[in-house]
C-alpha cells in the first residue's frame, strides 16, 4: 500500500487543505474488509501518550471491491488551528496521515505519513516554539502541552 501527501515537503499551515491519496498495490492478494484513512496528532515524550483524530474516512468491503486497485484514491480535510507541531525537549506533538487496510485473518497494514502543522508568520512557515508561545500569549488546549511549555521555557 502507498500513501502520498499533496506537499512533498510535509509542511502545512493552519486552515490549509491537506489532500492525501492512497493505493492498494495491484499485486496485493486476498480480500480486504475495510480501509480507514485519518488525519491525527499524537504526543511523544514524557508522560502519557495523547492522540486525537481530526478527520476520518472509512471504506467498507463492498466499496473496496468496486475500486480499481491500479488507481490512486484520495481524501482531503481542512487543517485546524491547533495543536501545532512541536519539537520540545520533554514533549513532541506530531501530525500524520494514517491509512489502515484491514486484511484477511485479522491482519492489518498500516502506513503513516508524518507532516508538520505550523502557524503562519511573516516570511513563511515555521514551528511555534515554547518561547514564542510564551511571548505571544498563545494558550494550548492541552494541559500536558501547556505544562511542558512552561517547564521548557523556564517559566
Image (spheres, rainbow, N blue to C red):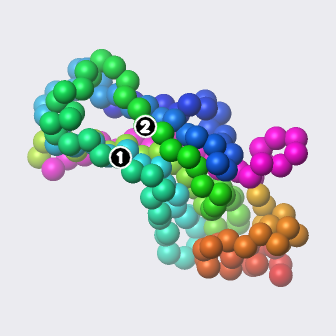
Depth check: give the residue in front, 104 or 7. Answer: 7
Mark closest to the chain's N terminus, 1 or 2: 1
Quadrant of the image for the N terminus?
Answer: top left
Q: Quadrant of residue 82?
A: bottom right
Q: What is the number of the mark on residue 153? A: none
Q: Is residue 102 visible?
A: yes
- Tag 1: Cα neighbours inside 10 Å, few (<14), some, or many (≥20)? few
| Picture residue at 43% right of the left edge, 37% below the top | 75
Closer to us: 3 or 17 = 17
Q: Is residue 52 left or right of residue 26?
A: right
Q: Secondary structure at mark 1?
A: strand
* Residue hosting label 1: 57
> SS at mark 2?
strand
Q: Determine which residue is flagged by label 2.
A: 75
**In the visual, does 57 lie left or right of 28?**
right
Which range is magenta? 106-127
The residue that appears at 67% across and 50% down in the rendered structure is 14
Residue at the (58%, 49%) spot, across then down? 79
Amino acid at each position: 500500500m502507498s500513501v502520498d501527501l499533496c506537499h512533498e515537503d510535509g509542511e502545512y499551515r493552519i486552515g490549509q487543505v491537506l489532500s492525501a491519496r492512497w493505493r492498494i498495490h495491484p499485486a496485493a492478494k486476498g480480500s480486504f474488509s475495510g480501509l480507514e484513512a485519518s488525519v491525527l496528532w499524537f504526543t511523544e515524550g514524557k508522560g502519557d501518550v495523547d492522540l486525537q483524530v481530526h478527520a476520518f474516512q472509512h471504506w467498507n468491503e463492498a466499496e473496496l471491491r468496486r475500486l480499481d486497485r491500479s488507481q490512486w484514491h484520495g481524501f482531503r480535510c481542512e487543517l485546524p488551528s491547533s495543536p501545532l507541531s512541536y519539537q520540545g525537549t520533554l514533549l513532541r506533538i506530531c501530525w500524520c496521515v494514517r491509512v489502515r487496510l484491514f486484511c484477511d485473518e485479522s491482519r492489518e497494514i498500516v502506513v503513516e505519513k508524518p507532516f508538520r502543522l505550523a502557524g503562519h508568520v511573516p516570511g513563511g512557515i515555521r514551528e511555534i516554539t515554547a518561547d514564542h508561545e510564551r511571548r505571544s500569549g498563545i494558550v494550548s488546549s492541552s494541559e500536558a502541552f501547556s505544562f511542558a511549555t512552561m517547564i521548557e521555557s523556564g517559566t
